[in-house]
Image (cartoon, coloured by chain):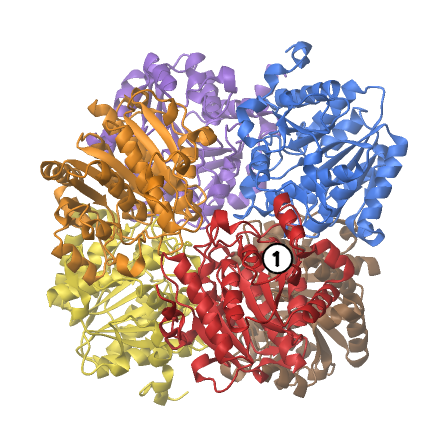
Chain colours: A yellow, B orange, C purple, D red, E blue, F brown
Amino acid sequence: MSENWLQPPEWAWINAGEKEEFVHQWVKPLKDCSGQPDVILYGAPISRSSISVSGASQYPDEFRRLWKKFATYNLEEDVDLTSLVVGDAGDVSMHTTDIFLSHQRIEAATKYLVEQYPESITCMIGGDHSVTACAIRGIKQKYSQKSIGILQLDTHLDVRDPKELGPANGTPIRQLIDSQVVQGNHIVNVGLHGFYNAKSLIDYAKDHEIQMIPLKKARNKGLLNTIRESIVNLSRQVDRIYVTVDMDVLDIAFAPGVPASTTGGMTSAELFDILLEIGKHASVKHIDFVCLDPTKDSSVQETVKIGVHAWLQYLTGKAMKE
Amino acid sequence: MSENWLQPPEWAWINAGEKEEFVHQWVKPLKDCSGQPDVILYGAPISRSSISVSGASQYPDEFRRLWKKFATYNLEEDVDLTSLVVGDAGDVSMHTTDIFLSHQRIEAATKYLVEQYPESITCMIGGDHSVTACAIRGIKQKYSQKSIGILQLDTHLDVRDPKELGPANGTPIRQLIDSQVVQGNHIVNVGLHGFYNAKSLIDYAKDHEIQMIPLKKARNKGLLNTIRESIVNLSRQVDRIYVTVDMDVLDIAFAPGVPASTTGGMTSAELFDILLEIGKHASVKHIDFVCLDPTKDSSVQETVKIGVHAWLQYLTGKAMKE
Amino acid sequence: MSENWLQPPEWAWINAGEKEEFVHQWVKPLKDCSGQPDVILYGAPISRSSISVSGASQYPDEFRRLWKKFATYNLEEDVDLTSLVVGDAGDVSMHTTDIFLSHQRIEAATKYLVEQYPESITCMIGGDHSVTACAIRGIKQKYSQKSIGILQLDTHLDVRDPKELGPANGTPIRQLIDSQVVQGNHIVNVGLHGFYNAKSLIDYAKDHEIQMIPLKKARNKGLLNTIRESIVNLSRQVDRIYVTVDMDVLDIAFAPGVPASTTGGMTSAELFDILLEIGKHASVKHIDFVCLDPTKDSSVQETVKIGVHAWLQYLTGKAMKE
Amino acid sequence: MSENWLQPPEWAWINAGEKEEFVHQWVKPLKDCSGQPDVILYGAPISRSSISVSGASQYPDEFRRLWKKFATYNLEEDVDLTSLVVGDAGDVSMHTTDIFLSHQRIEAATKYLVEQYPESITCMIGGDHSVTACAIRGIKQKYSQKSIGILQLDTHLDVRDPKELGPANGTPIRQLIDSQVVQGNHIVNVGLHGFYNAKSLIDYAKDHEIQMIPLKKARNKGLLNTIRESIVNLSRQVDRIYVTVDMDVLDIAFAPGVPASTTGGMTSAELFDILLEIGKHASVKHIDFVCLDPTKDSSVQETVKIGVHAWLQYLTGKAMKE
Amino acid sequence: MSENWLQPPEWAWINAGEKEEFVHQWVKPLKDCSGQPDVILYGAPISRSSISVSGASQYPDEFRRLWKKFATYNLEEDVDLTSLVVGDAGDVSMHTTDIFLSHQRIEAATKYLVEQYPESITCMIGGDHSVTACAIRGIKQKYSQKSIGILQLDTHLDVRDPKELGPANGTPIRQLIDSQVVQGNHIVNVGLHGFYNAKSLIDYAKDHEIQMIPLKKARNKGLLNTIRESIVNLSRQVDRIYVTVDMDVLDIAFAPGVPASTTGGMTSAELFDILLEIGKHASVKHIDFVCLDPTKDSSVQETVKIGVHAWLQYLTGKAMKE
Amino acid sequence: MSENWLQPPEWAWINAGEKEEFVHQWVKPLKDCSGQPDVILYGAPISRSSISVSGASQYPDEFRRLWKKFATYNLEEDVDLTSLVVGDAGDVSMHTTDIFLSHQRIEAATKYLVEQYPESITCMIGGDHSVTACAIRGIKQKYSQKSIGILQLDTHLDVRDPKELGPANGTPIRQLIDSQVVQGNHIVNVGLHGFYNAKSLIDYAKDHEIQMIPLKKARNKGLLNTIRESIVNLSRQVDRIYVTVDMDVLDIAFAPGVPASTTGGMTSAELFDILLEIGKHASVKHIDFVCLDPTKDSSVQETVKIGVHAWLQYLTGKAMKE
């Protein structure tokens, strides 16, 4: 496979046009947007890279399908989202069995978007957490001289060893640190809790100066304060901030549809408040939502509903700022 | 169909006697109560008027069945509910396919109850939200010169256009406003949140001066304060207050058994506190609980349990006041 | 049946060795521990003594199986549990149909453990709540001149009449009071709420001076303060404290896998905080977790996960103290 | 409401174009078909006319969605369905609460189709069984001088009294007999079994000479022979045959997604054989499939899969004949 | 406990009157029947004697509740069941924890029924299979000089050792043989299959000359022939025949609501044919249905429906004979 | 990666010893068997190569776990399986993300087994259907001069193009044909049915002379005759026969736990008869069972139970022959 295919990835995409029934009423296919949309949405439907069985590859479709049932008006903030221009780029086309190729396509697709639409926010809908490493590598290709910071909402550190597991969903943060795409001290993880990270992983995190803010500590200090401070501090140290929301940060009582969700996590209300806050910060240039598996959701689809709601809260924050 | 049938609706009822196994141990069939009970319970088992498929028509039966498993003593408030006299009037008899006729029967039955038992509180167990418009019209027939105020706990405004949908469950509040049974400014909606009301509906609500108190705002101010103030203010403006509890005001994590429940809603604990408060206010003369669909509930029936508990909290408040 | 069988109950046990695949990596079978472990774990897998159908007998196995998926490092408290020595004694061997014999074996096994390992904390995994009475009788045999206090986390009082029900799961506290093993005023129940205890049971509790602290009152005062005070006060009155955690104290939204769980109960977060606190108190010598039925749990096993997490929180508190 | 609206029901339809994502790859929207297609498909998405709660209104959408996952080649018969021209007319537009109006639209839409496409077979996808009466009345308007026979595959007779229930799903056959649209002796019901028809209904059927062939009798004689003979006999007596397949004729072990399905019914294999046979008979001019409720189906959607497969078997029979 | 309590077990019963809502329309409470009913129904709601967790104790209630939804007319046989007189004796009252006492009550209750109603058929609704031993011992008390034969429809032999398990549901046949209530060669087991009986149990069965007719052999010979021959042969050897239907004889694809059901078992259609046949034989004086656990059934309750249907097939056979 | 790693794949295995709790009581770990066992069992736990999301990777564990609940005595055939020597080799160790590497390990492991144990039958438990191609390539390495025939029980042909999909589960048969490991005319597929194979795939099959025997045709001829003839014919043309059982050949009513199962498939009883027959043929040297996904199974695990039962039927046939 030549480097070549990383060029304009025309064929790497499922054409959004083919799936246009999925696009929300006020959202246009990216190809129909003129200029630079406020936000670009794209899907990365892969989860065969997940350590445990996961159907997160089906989330982009379910996300778009359920989204259509939400109105555009946020009553609590008195904000109408139609003031934002959002372009839907469709999904990156995944290979059936070649995980490495699929990952390269996500990287290439992200690079393409940040090159063509430098003024737009990108929002990637996963897929399992492996996609985050791909997206950030893609961004780094465009901004090779710039530093990238990560605000991670996650129950886990995701610093397991890619030498052992390959580019699996437990490894993205370590991939980025070990390949020097992102510095460990430019990563803030908020939401860690309980007994879900082995001691050796915590040692790795400490050695690489990842800032770990457990949920209990964040709650004591105020979750919004914690998020605000983390973004402000990061924005002083790096050129652009990437937010990655691993939906397993939610408590299992709220999010049955996340294979790795646990007890002791965030409530959905906490997550919604956080996303609203994040939306208000211009230094956040990229965001993703990962690890939500619609096939494991309850029959009333409460987890997918949280996923859509969280995304709309982010947009609300963004619209309030503007 | 003549006006006539709206008279003593003897035949409009499923005789409570036929279902007496459903009556809780300390509750008597209405026909066996002498005088004016403190509270009269009756069911309005219709949900084919629901926009989406709903089995809320089965709630009155499930409500009575599960209620039998609850004791009468409220430990937290040290109150024994047996001090109240509660009469069960059974269910209004619904027609299989004639929604309009069924709605008229609910109206007639309610009119009959408020005429015969003017000193009793009425509590209607729905059914979908369309039944609220019927009940209030029935009350208005008795109290045609009096003004009625509504305290609505709901995720939605329920002001969709009956010209388009007929008397469906998305329209009751608008039916009442458009037919001048209730004034828009005598309606307070507490619990609105998220992205579940289209902009046009909010515009209607503003035009008609419905007081919208989103959940976030109510929480900031204190939910109980909000409820208390709403009732006190309403009681200055109107002659009698009708409380309607659309169970979809609850967060979907607590109430899977409500077809329209969403993320971002109330917790069950919040709802219980509110109902206790409402029970303490003598100006509240009518209450209903609607839109709970037992067929969609989880296998442990958590939503129906919330429904019964909420009702008992209301009674507790009532017993505390007396 | 002679008294004799209460002697060294070699045959009364399922040998932990037979099930050693269930033992967590850092936990040894009791027989392989030298000296006095910090904590001894044992199972009492009986639930045919439950008033309603219950599969709580399967909890010890599920508990051990799921525990293996938890790490040993508590990130929020920065504590590594491997500093504790925990011995797993396996399960007490139950008879298929002779409930009385099974109960005697639990009593004998507990007596054996407290005699052989007087310096260890015992932790029993039920089974339904009937096992608590057996365990405390076993302890009392060893400490016949000492007084035992009980801190009970429970939605119910569990003082139904054994004369009527036999030694069922609704009766353990009354068994102990009526047989003068424990004094009523040495029992504190925290977490009572709602409409789940008949008036007559509350009267019994008042007559016997059981301290009832309903959940609402405990929350108003601060749950941790309430727990701390209860333990401190008890420790002034009794020689050793037994904590019994009936998992039905949890709200049904968090704990679908407890047959008797109700609305209006504790959140899992509240329970975790409480267990951490309890772990810090040296006066607590015994603890049990009962009434969790894995066969009724949701498909993502959220209740069993809470059960394991709660236990690890207790160990965390214990490790912090040391 | 004027007669007028029964004219070209342009507005009575959900335009198939709006939903064209649902059309199977080799099937064209009706409006894009030139001439007379072999088969015309249309949906009648109503189930609020059902006696029990039913979500059969969602079947047309689920049917089309799942159909896309089926290939066109019938391996067992060596037939490629693409040799047939099938046009999808979309769904008849239903009113939210006016059941009578919705029924009139189905009637008008069917009349329109048989007038415009007299050489095409019509296939209606319900909806509950009330839609069959509407469709046949629509056909009768076009063929008022012709006699129509019905082959009904059903567990029930569906001759409950419309005077009591209105045009509910238990009444369609009686509606047609009582209004003399169809003669009782032109109706053959195959598949009746068990204890699901009250004695009074059987008496009605006998009085009106409905031919009742219970499943056991049909099996003894050979199911295919029974079907073949029934069609041949009917075709001697009437001008056109309408086949109505109430999916509750299936055994509940195969069809959990039919609210009224029972034990003792047909296997799916039997139904498939029957549909293949029916497809071969030119005298069958109309067919419908009713009462399948996708919201009650198992998580693997076995009932909807049977529904699609049965329809393709019918087409296979049709293609074999040609 | 004295022998005495085995006398007229007035207090041993849940009065059928208390539960009269459960009695089917054409069935009278036994106390209201004059003379000797054709069939007497009674429940034995115990399953804490089950080796695995079972909720079969809830079957009598569910059976009666669902039965009300069945009509009385058997269409396939053209038989109206109202020609039979069936009396419902209610349920035997079970003790909460004393399994032995509960078993004695079943024995006493059965003895009482056969003494008072010697001309009636008794039909007992279990409960787990342990109840069969009790019932037959009760019958034997009345007919101590007579021999009883058993026709058992079962996947298992149920000859595990009561010395080891007590009177658990795996032991009833062995209890009866070892105590010489029934001779091994008077027992015919039809429906055995697969890998569900240990070799040692088969050896026991062979040693005691139990006639084992595996399902495959029975099918080869014809199931109805097998049943007919078994009954005819038995009736030559014994004075009265007791039929026990362990619902686990059904294949798990048809009967998910039986804890021990397996693959490779009977279809429901086969069971229905068999019950019809059994009903025709006057030598069968007693029948029971055991081990159906409604709490494990699918959400559409297919297994309970089979249970009721099977019972009605038996009655149909009985009515045909008369 | 060098050829080298294909040598003694010590490290390629999960040591069966580590999992020995999974081995059935009468089955030994392979390493503890002396000589050549009759049958060798090994797992290939991979399903990330599946086109749709699949948890078939968890089947080997569930298979072993549930197997322990089956006895060894086949009652219907009067055969005790303990007469066979079965060795469990454990599972081939899979890489987390490198599908190609995992596939190579399955190939190497199979080659190793057939080299070391040339007289044993191998039985592989998948995994998805991609593993069959690997196993046969491994066998071919040992028997490079010999021809291999395949008897495939499958709803699908599995001849999709590996050039497009890579070595996914829809491609194994085509991989083998295109690489000339197996000739098309040495493949017999029994069980094809319905509308689940695109026309183009059937054309491929015809071009390569795969023998397609649809289920309907096989049933008409007799399923056992068909199987017997297929094996006998194949054994005349090839040196050794490999049987691959794709569990999706079963009807979805019996096998909900197979992602691709469809309506119109085999009953479990048919599959059991077939496996018994296959077991009797000495020319069958290898067998596998694939595509069973325990995570999608019903709560009573009926599909896994069928999987175990089918395997035991195969062993029964084998034992009968000997």
SS label for mark 1: loop
Residue C153 visible in the displayed image: no
Badge 1 sits on which subunit?
Answer: D
What residue lies at 39% left-to-right and 73% top-to-bottom?
Answer: D9
Looking at the image, residue A91 lies above or below residue A214: below
Task: Left or right? Give the position of B40 relative to E82.
Answer: left
Q: In the image shown, does C194 or F81 lie closer to the viewer?
A: C194
Residue occupied by mark 1: D154
What crowding class fits label 1: few (fewer than 14 Cα within 10 Å), some (14-19), or many (20 or more)? many
Where residue C285 appears, as percent x and y from the top left, is 37, 26
Label 1 sits on what residue type?
Asp
Dividing the picture into quadrants, the one containing residue F36 is: bottom right
Q: Quadrant of the N terminus of chain C?
A: top right
Task: Left or right? Give the position of C148 relative to B157.
Answer: right
Q: In the image shown, does F321 or A293 lie closer to the viewer?
A: A293
Task: Left or right? Give the position of E246 relative to B179.
Answer: right
Q: Quadrant of the C terminus of chain C?
A: top left
Dividing the picture into quadrants, the one containing residue D77 is: bottom right
The number of numbered discs placed on residues in the rendered structure image is 1
Looking at the image, residue A22 lies above or below residue C90: below
Where residue D289 appears, as percent x and y from the top left, is 55, 64
Q: Looking at this view, name the residue that lies furthest to the right.
A: E236
